[in-house]
Amino acid sequence: MPETTTAEAPEAPAPPRRRPRAAIAVLTTLGLAAVLGAAGAIGWSVLRAPTAKQIETAGEKEIATRWATLPAGEIFPARVKEDIPPRNMSGLFGQTPENKASRGFVQRAGIAPEAACAQAFDPKLADVLTKNGCQTVLRATYIDSTGTLATTIGVAVMGDVRQAGRAEAAVNTAFGSALKESVGLRAVAFPGTAAKDFTDALRQDFWMDVPQAPYLMFRTSGWTLDRGKPDRKVLIEDFSFARFMQSRILDRLSDRTEPCERKRVQC
């Protein structure tokens, strides 16, 4: 006959163990101590002085965001006294005697709207910069104290310092001396100023600087009226005001004052 299987009734569950009251009290105390300890650690973390590494990181971040946090007028000042020796001005009859009137003020003609890298540079240069991390470009045009020379100064915003260095190397490899002679930042004209006719066609001098910051600095300079193509030595002398202004703007963006002394860094 077939074997019969009998289902056995399940065993009754064991009664729950009661944790001694003393043990519960001990565990509660330990748990509260752990919570208080964690809270204390958090409070200490918030209140303790920042480390040197944290200060350095905050300082680098402040420099990297200056292009966006500073007012445009602080990046590109409106009027700056020329802190350069008087220079000889080239004229129709060659070099004229020292022009003491040129030792005056560099005036800002205007600040251009923020532009894409593809719009702010000659196409081939724009292509190299864009491929190497150029994010956006700030530009302003200045007039020298004689009202006859103009320069557009540009700040190409990069991702970080290393990216700026790689972009510099790529630009120098791609263009070499052409970067100083025929390729560069596009000029910006401003109606109603001495720079109203300062277009790309009037550009004579080009340059790029790389500070220890996530920026590349460019300038393109020329006369406010067409004067042909002068000797290179004349360009270097006449456009010293442009180098001066570019240096001022570069210093503003890459100033290495101790981070805790900067108003935008809280230590």
Image (cartoon, helix red, strand yellow):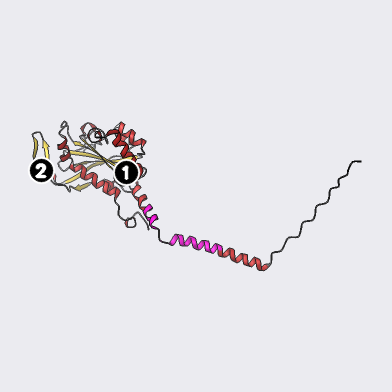
The N terminus: image quadrant: top right
x, y percent for residue 74? 28, 48
Q: Nearer the viewer, residue 262 or 51?
A: 51
> Would residue 111 be found to the left or right of residue 85 on screen?
right
Residue 77 seen: no
Please name the amino acid that badge 2 sits on. Answer: Asn
> Would residue 34 be found to the left or right of residue 48 on screen?
right
Residue 42 lies in the magenta-colored region = yes
Q: Read off the magenta span.
A: 34-57
x, y percent for residue 164? 33, 42
x, y percent for residue 27? 62, 64
Residue 149 lies in the magenta-colored region = no
Secondary structure of the magenta portion, mostly?
helix
Q: Nearer the viewer, residue 252 or 189?
A: 252
Q: Which residue is mark 1?
A: 215
Residue neighbourhood size for the residue with mark 2, other residues' Cα within 10 Å, grouped as few (<14), some (14–19), many (≥20): few
> Would residue 2 be found to the left or right of residue 87 on screen?
right
Whichever of labels 1 and 2 marks the residue nearer the N terminus, that label is: 2
Q: Nearer the viewer, residue 50 or 266?
A: 50
SS at mark 2 in the image? loop
Q: Which residue is mark 2?
A: 99
x, y percent for residue 165? 33, 42
